[in-house]
Image (cartoon, helix red, strand yellow):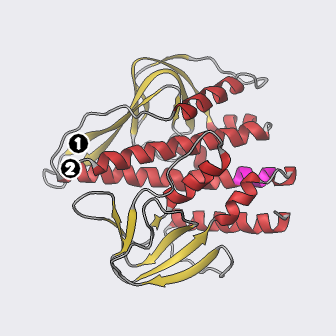
Amino acid sequence: MEQAKAEQFLDELQNITRIIYSGQIPQIKPSATLLAKTIKPADMPFIKKDAAGQALFYIVEGKAGVDIGQPERIIVPPKRTVGEMSMISTVINACDNLMAVQSRTADVYAEEPMKLIVFNYSPLIEILKDPNPELRKLRGQVMISLNRIMYRKLMEVNQNYVNVLISYGLEMEADEANYPLQLVEAMSRFLKKMKTIPNISISPHDLRGTLIRQGEQNSSIAFINEGKVKISMTVKNEVTEKEERVELGILTAPTMVGESSILNVGAVSSSQVDAMDRTFGFRMEVQNLLRHLQRYPDLFEQFFQVLLELNYFRTIHMMQKTASL
């Protein structure tokens, strides 16, 4: 891909990422990758489960209904997106020769007349697979934007799980997610490579108690080498008006937590992370980690690809848990 076209595409990807986080009604210039569209309610979904797709949709007006197997569709209001999972799965399938993941995870319907911003991400694959070394920096920025979109989706899916759980009056214990062996091995390889970086201080030690507190700013990321961590969230029950702690899941080493800070330094955490039993790992300030990784472009890309895959499978797991309630 030509440098100029790649830069234009990156600019439009970052534009749609800013739109997603700001929740604004944007003014966009129509292009090959970013355009406006209107759709009407219909019996057929405009996003079909297990069908290949090439677009991410930002809802400007109207509501979408997501069918994940529950009696009622999950309603997605304006200023939110649909189609993220298809985009990320397309990237994973293109970039990781060892992985093969499903394209779409749910049918999505127009519940009422909708105005959308459609982001055509097909050129994304060209940038990520192009061996041109001049595009290396752009590829890193693409992966950062994709991780921001994926992390936001994970937070929305977590919140939806909690809402459904409370509405049904259920109590569920955290369970362990079984991630693909390829992802576990990729995480292990990355942690080993990190140790080879000169002048980087990595010394796994015993981690205890609460590693990340909900509602507090977090400027560090924690790498878990051995053991497990529990993810939970405190929410207010609208019926009883009491706060309840809901367990979201258990992550088994090797893994990482606190990734919100890597995408937005000092971000407030939406959940709590506690070490379980004997857990070993280490923490690192985000700015320090990025400073080291930026000296090694291949490792930089590897980190964000592993993080993208990790949060993709965390999101899939939470969607499956919600569907089974």
Decide: few, some or many residues near mark 1? Use Cα within 10 Å; few <14, some 14-19, many ≥20.
few
Looking at the rendered structure, the secondary structure element under dot 2 is: helix
On screen, 312 above or below 199? below
Indicate the amino acid at tag 1.
Glu
One can see residue 311 in this view: yes
Query: Marks 2 and 1: CB-CB under 8 Å?
Result: yes
Q: CA distance from mark 2 to mark 1?
A: 9 Å
Please state, as top left, top right, bottom left or bottom right, where the N terminus lies in the image: bottom right
Q: Is residue 254 above or below residue 321?
A: above
Main SS class of the magenta portion in the image:
helix
Q: Mark 2, mark 1: which one is toward the viewer?
A: 2
Residue shown at the point (46%, 65%) measured from the top left: 82
**Residue 215, x across and y down, in percent:** 40, 44
At horizontal 31% and vertical 45% (from top left) the residue drawn is: 321
Taking the image as shown, residue 12 lies to the left or right of residue 88, namely right
- Describe residue 52's horizontal placement relative to residue 111 as left or right: right
Q: Position of residue 272 (x, y in %)?
A: 39, 37
The residue located at (66%, 73%) in the rendering is 33
Where is 199 relative to 126, above or below? above
Q: Position of residue 216 (x, y in %)?
A: 44, 42
Q: Which residue is mark 2?
A: 166
Q: Nearer the viewer, residue 73 or 152?
A: 73
Q: Which sits earlier in the primary sequence, circle 2 or circle 1?
A: 2
Chain part drawn in magenta? 136-141
Give the labeled residue for mark 1: 244
> Does the magenta portion include 320?
no
Task: Please tell me how crowded label 2 is: few (under 14), some (14-19), or many (20+) other residues with Cα within 10 Å.
Answer: some
Residue occupying the far left of the picture: 240
Q: Is residue 265 visible?
A: no
Instruction: Answer above or below: position of 12 versus 222.
Output: below
Determine the secondary structure under disc 1: strand
Coordinates of residue 61 in the picture (x, y in percent): 42, 79
